[in-house]
Amino acid sequence: MLRGLRRLNRYDKRILDIVKLGGKLVRLHQFGFSRKTEEGFRFPIHAIEIGTEKAIQKRPVGLVAGVHGLETVGIRILLDFLESILHKKSEGFLPEIEKGKLGLVVIPILNPGGVARKTRSNPAGVDLMRNSGVDAEMAPPLFGGQKWTNQLPYYRGTSLEPESKALYRFVHHYFFSNENAIMPVLDLHSGFGTVDHVWWPYARTKTPCLDTPIYEKMAQYLTEGRKHTRYKFGPQSETYTTHGDLWDRFYDHYVERVIGPNPKHKARFLPLTLEVGTWSDLKDNPSKIFRKRGIFNPAKENKFETIVTHREFLRDFLLLSQSELKDWL
């Protein structure tokens, strides 16, 4: 666990440096703690606000990483991107933040206990992306989520874990009360296949979600308008279905509690998942399949390229929040 703790400490230091880099435009908040480890550690779960308080209230957009403790390349992609958009001498500097046109809210590491322990799951052995309690119509055995034991992977748990609750508090706090904004939220993962996927709800069913037309138009804009052709867009269920997806649960809560009572509501909470395909270098580096973090992260010689490759896409993703609902209907 010592090496994992050192890695977590390095990430925490970078987060503090990002807060300093942004000055008055960046604020750090705590939304909860991780499940306690066997050694008795409980790690804080922090969120970063970037932008003016008014922009956070009026036009929030979200980024999340570190849901699975082994998928650390997502954390590094996110931290690199934040450094890029906040550094005034960087090519990626985002003036819209300084001008109060965009408010960014970020959970850089949702599962710090998993990062410290170098496990996919949290310290209780629960896979957070199988933990929402939502049942899929049909999911593959084991991989789709299981309730038998935390000694096997993809354990769903018996109730919402502290990390899942922290994410829900984060989502509810920043997105549920907004009345007039497009609010995309991107969750960064890695390890599935050789293609970079961008998934929208649902993971549990092939039935289209309410906002499928909006998602489809956004995908078309990002691929044709912004030339992000390396990404394959679609609902997660087109690739595979799973039990317990947190974003399915949060999205459905939003639809039921916010849009349901007011179908003409002018805001939309739009969660998506970026699944970075990290298997593409297996042919050149087959030994990585035997390393604990190997298939979830690029090989060492490809790591820097993988991290910086997504800067432009993430920048354009944030700028989606500058549009209005009517632009997508």
Image (tube, grey):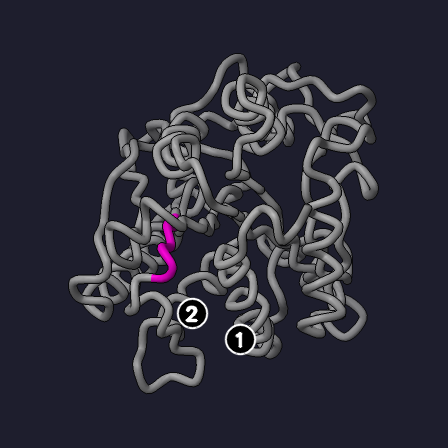
The answer to whether the residues at label 1 and label 2 have Cβ atoms under 8 Å apart is yes
- Residue at position x 74%, y 66% in the image: 223
Q: Callout 2: 10 Å neighbours few (<14), some, many (20+)?
A: some
Picture residue at 25% right of the left edge, 39% below the top? 30
Most common secondary structure along the magenta stretch: strand
Q: Nearer the viewer, residue 113 or 26?
A: 26
SS for dot 2: helix
Find out whether residue 105 is within the magenta segment: yes
Determine whether 20 is above or below 62 in the image: below
Percent across and percent down for residue 115 are 43, 47
Residue 278 rendering spot, x and y as whole percentages? 68, 62
Task: Give the residue type that dot 1 points to.
Answer: Val
Q: Is residue 281 left or right of residue 293?
A: right
Residue under label 2, please give it. Answer: 80
Q: What span is colored magenta in the figure?
A: 101-106
Query: Image quarter for residue 306?
Result: bottom right
Give residue 272's position: percent from left, percent from top: 61, 46
Q: Secondary structure at mark 1?
A: helix
In the depicted view, which residue is nearer to us: 314 or 320? 320
- Tell me what residue is drawn at x 64 percent, y 27 percent: 152
Q: Disc 1 marks which residue?
A: 308
* 1 or 2: tag closer to the N-terminus: 2
Q: Is residue 194 magenta?
A: no
Q: Is residue 313 left or right of residue 32?
A: right
Residue 36: % across, % down: 33, 28
- Mark 1–mark 2 distance (CA, rounded to whole Å): 7 Å
Q: Residues within 10 Å of mark 1 (few under 14, many from 20)?
A: some
Is residue 249 something one can see in this rendering?
no
